[in-house]
Image: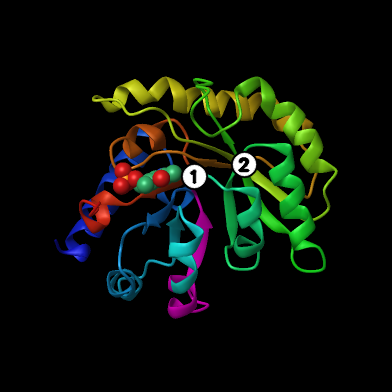
Amino acid sequence: MDILENLLRVQDRIHGACHRAGRDPEEVRLVAVTKNVPVDRIETAMGLGLRCFGENYVQEAIPKIRVLGPEAQWHFIGHLQTNKVKNVVGSFHMIQTVDRVPLAREIDRRAAGSHPVPVLIEVSIAGEATKSGVAPDGVAPLLQEIFRLPNLRLQGLMTMPPLFEDPEGARPHFRALRELRDRLRAQVPPPHDLEELSMGMTGDFEVAIEEGATFVRIGTALFGPRQA
Ligand SMILES: *Cc1c(COP(=O)(O)O)cnc(C)c1O
């Protein structure tokens, strides 16, 4: 699989979705998801101009972050255990998966004395108990707690809907995330904001862009199928 060819196709599809939605493609940033992708392929992607990468597992990510150096920006997109926070703060540029108060507090504690950490709140629109992400009605209380923590900078919301055969199945989830954001926006004091909506993966990113995504997290469409 040729990463250049894949990237051009993904960029083309991003532009197409933006065009349909009347959006500026500059508003949509590509997070290249590199779980199970070896360093040399990530280097190839950097050579093609990609700078923003998403990783799910701390242990897998840390060596890649070291090797690829300060030009790359890393977003943590996996379920984050509280005891792993110390390895994430300082290595990642953004944590997209804050979904509970103890996690927010631990990020705050570990970031004390250095730069504030940009975070997104992960929302489970369907509210499925087994998935990570806070249920929609838990977002406002979590916001209030985050506003009390000096070392977090809230920037938006993230979601990962269940898998649908037809990407249209994900549309109501994406739309609900945007509507939730629009409702909560007025409650968010600077320096926090809710500009960012991280939603859409290989199977559904065009629908997500039509519904307002500002980050799309794409692995397979760029790097090919993941080896188990
Ligand atoms: C793996 C993963 C992605 C990328 O999935 P693809 O379908 O390969 O594009 C995006 N977001 C999260 C949270 C993931 O775990």
Residue situated in front as seen by the camera: 83 or 107: 83
Residue situated in front as seen by the camera: 99 or 42: 99
Coordinates of residue 79 in the picture (x, y in percent): 52, 44
Is residue 33 depicted above or below 115 in this figure? above
* Image-based side of 74 in relation to 134, left or right: left
Look at the numbered disc 1 and give the secondary structure of its residue.
loop
Residue situated in front as seen by the camera: 6 or 223: 223
The quadrant of the picture occupied by the N terminus is bottom left
Marks 2/1 in contact by CB < 8 Å: the verdict is yes
Question: What range is drawn magenta here?
Answer: 64-78
Residue situated in front as seen by the camera: 132 or 189: 132
Q: Quadrant of residue 64?
A: bottom left
Q: Quadrant of residue 137?
A: top right
Per the rendering, the mark at residue 150 is none
- Does the image show residue 163? yes
Look at the numbered disc 2 and give the secondary structure of its residue.
strand
Circle 2 crowding by C-alpha within 10 Å: few under 14, some 14–19, many from 20:
many
* Image-based side of 32 in relation to 124, left or right: left
Disc 1 marks a residue whose amino acid type is Thr
Residue 77 inside the magenta-drawn segment: yes
Image point (59%, 62%), residue name: 93
Per the rendering, the mark at residue 214 is 1
Coordinates of residue 26 in the picture (x, y in percent): 45, 53
Coordinates of residue 5 in the picture (x, y in percent): 17, 61
* Disc 2/disc 1 C-alpha distance (Å): 10 Å
Q: Can you name the residue that lies furthest to the front here?
A: 83
Circle 2 residue:
156
- Does the image show residue 24? no
